[in-house]
Structure formats: structure tokens, C-alpha cells
Image (cartoon, rainbow, N blue to C red):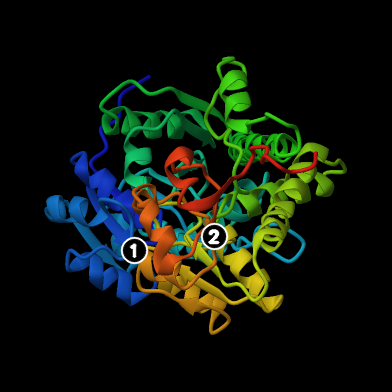
């Protein structure tokens, strides 16, 4: 493969993945132009301010500011870069698919800019899409508005990232592997050369056709959700069998290299902006092609069950006229995102059942307030949330919650019920200060 030296990159979309992508690429010596049609993230990035909340993003922007610029001008971004990464939203549609309207809009503007460029340019779609979207919705628009031919005058790749909010920069710079779906070999070679320079250590790069890459991206996410739901299925079973503990079971079976321990934690359901919708969208895509993904459908069914299951557990142990405290509203630690958050969903369901609820989260209070409104009470600290409650549920395994003192659960001289969904606290330390309940563990005194 002939090595192509890439120096200049543009990133379209300065959201929760795009902004960290700009900073990560700049940290490896590339000149990076960030583009967004909204003026606020552009102005923030130009001023050296992180446009979104993400671990280490501000630090990386500050350290690499001389290599970072931002604009709302597509022509400026395309003419001054060799590769353009497109990371715009693909909102979920009512039937479960993904809308490509923002991709098409970006493609039109990129195409118009490409019309003015003589050099070969690579357009790399990073947004999650369904199989066929890149070749049916992106490439034709690029060709129409550029007057050029894909594979001859410019190249296209489908190049999704496998990241988790809260560790995006780390995931971008140290991935398990890189997936490249290429329109042609030349384009794939260029993108592979870029990644060879980006990574400090050898990283597997899987190159394939665009449609296979589209399938691989959403299939991987769906497989992970299957592991999560499988562990939660085991947790529900273990709660009913005397002496059973899901962590002991998953630790054993996870030792088998065919299974692995990652994402095999019997706790709460999966949430966030990717997993739930990706799993549903994969099932939708299968139906479009005349088949069904029964395993993906079962995974979704199990996941939807978790909020009601935990809510029922709460109500079973809540004293009459008791109050519930929920610790954790972000869908995972180290982010303020509450998309399909289990903690938010439980709070909402309890409030509909007229149970008084007080909530607390280190970062996600503002976002949760937009969803929950005045249905719940908002604590300003862990201590305040616990003090206002008869029963406390830990729904997000924040580091702050791992350091809780047992004494907090005896405030006011009363012993509280503590439901530790992630089993982050020491049972022996808390069982004297509270009625300690762990998900996935048989509770003594319970009838099987």
C-alpha cells in the first residue's frame, strides 16, 4: 500500500463525538477544522472552549489550540482539508429506522464545495446508519452537487467509531479496532494511512465494502446489548434461587474466552443515545429486508422489563407513605447524558404512581430536570437526597457513590432501605446501617 501523508482534517458536526474527535486528532499533530451550522459550538471552539461536556475535552483543546480552528463555511473546511469526517445526527424515526436528512443536507454542502476542488478528497461518514444508507443517501447527493464521480474524483468511506460517552477521547485514540467500509481501494488506503499516523500502537484495521461495514457497526452494538440483557436475565433468576449470586455466575462464565467478562454485569438495563435505538433499528432494518432478528427483539424486550422490575422491587420494600431517593440520573458515569436513563425512567414511573421521589446526580441534574420537570424533588447533595428518603436506590455507579458512608443511612435515627443496583458498596459495611438489597442476589427470608 502506497503511504499517503495526511496533514489536514475537517470534522462536520461539533456534538458529543465530533468535538472530541477534533481535539483527539489535533493531539496527534493534525491540523483540524471543526464545522457546525450552529454558531455557538463554532464560537466556543474558536475561543478554546469545549462545546460539549466530555472527559478531558477541555484539556485537549487547550493543549492543542494552535492546531484547531472552527467555521460555519463548508467551502473553507473542504478546500483546506484532505479528509472530511461527517458526524451529524441520525435521529430515530417512529418505526425504528434512522433519518438521514442531516446526512443529505451535509452531503449537498460538501458536494458544492468539492465542485471547487481539484485534488482528490475523502469523505468519511461516521454517523450510525442502516445498511445501504451511505450508497443510497450520501454518495448520490455528493455526485449530484459536485458534478464528480465517487471513486474517481473523490472517495467515500463508512468509518464509524466505537466509543462510550465519558471516555470518547480515550476510545478514539486507543480503539480495539478500526472499521473502514470503502468505496474503492485508493480511498481505503488513504484512510488507513491516516489511522496509521494517528495511533501510537498497532491497531487492527478491518477494511471491507461499505454495506458490510454498516452491518458490522450496528451488529456489534446489538451483540453488546445482548450480553447486557443476558446478564440481567441471569440476575432475575438468581434473585429467586436460594444461595444464588449473579456476580459469581458471570465471573465464572466470563472467564471463558468465547464469552468474556465485559458487559456481563447483572444490574440495570442498557440506556444512552446509542444502544437502545441501535438494537431497535437493526430489527427494523431486518424486517425491511424480509427477515426478523429474533434475538435482537428478545434483547429489547428484556431491557424494557428492567425499569418495571426494579420499580416493583422498590414498592415492595417501601414503607407506607415512604419517600424514595434515586442516586444516579445520567445513563452512565462521567457524563451528563440522560437519554433513556434507567434512573430517570424509574423516577418518572414512581411519580406517576404518586410515590414521592427525590433525585441526585453529580452532573446530570439540569438535563434530568428537562425530562422530569416538577414531578420529583431535586437534592443538592448525596446527603440531602438520602436524608429526604426512606428507601434509596443507586442507579448509576458514580465514583462518588462508591465512597458513601454507612452513617448516612442512619440519619435522623432511622434505618433506611438501600437498593444497590450495581453492587458497588460493601454489603457487610452497610447491612448494619440499612436494609441492604443487591440486584441479582437471593435475599434471605424471601420465598423462592
Q: Quadrant of the C terminus?
A: top right
Q: Where does the image place residue 168, in percent across and percent down from the top left?
A: 37, 46
In this picture, residue 425 sits left or right of residue 43: right
Residue named by callout 2: 103
Nearer to the camera, 152 or 304: 304
Residue named by callout 1: 52
The residue tagged with tag 2: helix, strand or loop? helix
Residue most toward the front?
413
**Residue occupying the point 66% across, 41% down:** 443
Of circles 2 and 1, the one toward us is 1
Neighbor class of circle 1 (other Cα within 10 Å; few <14, some 14-19, many 20+) is some
In whole angstroms, how far apart are the C-alphas of marks 2 and 1? 21 Å
Residue 91 quadrant: bottom right
Q: Where does the image place residue 258, in percent across and percent down from the top left?
A: 62, 16
Q: Quadrant of the N terminus?
A: top left
Residue most toward the right?
290
Residue 13 visible to the viewer:
no
Residue most toward the bottom?
374
Residue 167 visible to the viewer:
yes
Amino acid at each position: 500500500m502506497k503511504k499517503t501523508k495526511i496533514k489536514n482534517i475537517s470534522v462536520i458536526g461539533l456534538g458529543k463525538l465530533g468535538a472530541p474527535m477534533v481535539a483527539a486528532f489535533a493531539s496527534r499533530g493534525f491540523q483540524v477544522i471543526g464545522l457546525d451550522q450552529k454558531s455557538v459550538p463554532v464560537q466556543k471552539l474558536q475561543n478554546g472552549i469545549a462545546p460539549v461536556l466530555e472527559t478531558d475535552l477541555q484539556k485537549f483543546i487547550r493543549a492543542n489550540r494552535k492546531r484547531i480552528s472552527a467555521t460555519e463555511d463548508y467551502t473553507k473546511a473542504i478546500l483546506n482539508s484532505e479528509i472530511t469526517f461527517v458526524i451529524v445526527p441520525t435521529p430515530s424515526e417512529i418505526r425504528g429506522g434512522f433519518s438521514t436528512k442531516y446526512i443529505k443536507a451535509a452531503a449537498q454542502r460538501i458536494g458544492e464545495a468539492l465542485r471547487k476542488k481539484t485534488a482528490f478528497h475523502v469523505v468519511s461518514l461516521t454517523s450510525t446508519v442502516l445498511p445501504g444508507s451511505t450508497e443510497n443517501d450520501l454518495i448520490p447527493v455528493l455526485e449530484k452537487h459536485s458534478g464528480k464521480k465517487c471513486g474517481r474524483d473523490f472517495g467515500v468511506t463508512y468509518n464509524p467509531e466505537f466509543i462510550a460517552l465519558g471516555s470518547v477521547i480515550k476510545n478514539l485514540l486507543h480503539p480495539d479496532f478500526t472499521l473502514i467500509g470503502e468505496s474503492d481501494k485508493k480511498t481505503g488506503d488513504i484512510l488507513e494511512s491516516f489511522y496509521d499516523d494517528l495511533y501510537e500502537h498497532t491497531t487492527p484495521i478491518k477494511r471491507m465494502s461499505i454495506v458490510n461495514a454498516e452491518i458490522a457497526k450496528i451488529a456489534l452494538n446489538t451483540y453488546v446489548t445482548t450480553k447486557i440483557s443476558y446478564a440481567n436475565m441471569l440476575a432475575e433468576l438468581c434473585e429467586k434461587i436460594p444461595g444464588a449470586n449473579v456476580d459469581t455466575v458471570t465471573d465464572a462464565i466470563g472467564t471463558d474466552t468465547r464469552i468474556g467478562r465485559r458487559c456481563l454485569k447483572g444490574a440495570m438495563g442498557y440506556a444512552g443515545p446509542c444502544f437502545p435505538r441501535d438494537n431497535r433499528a437493526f430489527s427494523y432494518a431486518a424486517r425491511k429486508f424480509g427477515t426478523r432478528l429474533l434475538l435482537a427483539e428478545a434483547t429489547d424486550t428484556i431491557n424494557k422489563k428492567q425499569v418495571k422490575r426494579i420499580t416493583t422491587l422498590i414498592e415492595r420494600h417501601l414503607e407506607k407513605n415512604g419517600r424514595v431517593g434515586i442516586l444516579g440520573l445520567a445513563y452512565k458515569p462521567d457524563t451528563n447524558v440522560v437519554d433513556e436513563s434507567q434512573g430517570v425512567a424509574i423516577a418518572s414511573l414512581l411519580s406517576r404512581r404518586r410515590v414521592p421521589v427525590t433525585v441526585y446526580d453529580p452532573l446530570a441534574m439540569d438535563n434530568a430536570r428537562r425530562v422530569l420537570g416538577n414531578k420529583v424533588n431535586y437534592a443538592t447533595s448525596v446527603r440531602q437526597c438520602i436524608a429526604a428518603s426512606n428507601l434509596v436506590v443507586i442507579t448509576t455507579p458514580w465514583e462518588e457513590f462508591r465512597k458513601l458512608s454507612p452513617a448516612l443511612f442512619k440519619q435522623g435515627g432511622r434505618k433506611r432501605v438501600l437498593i444497590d443496583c450495581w453492587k458497588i458498596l460493601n454489603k457487610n459495611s452497610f447491612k448494619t446501617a440499612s436494609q441492604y438489597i443487591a440486584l441479582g442476589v437471593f435475599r434471605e427470608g424471601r420465598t423462592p
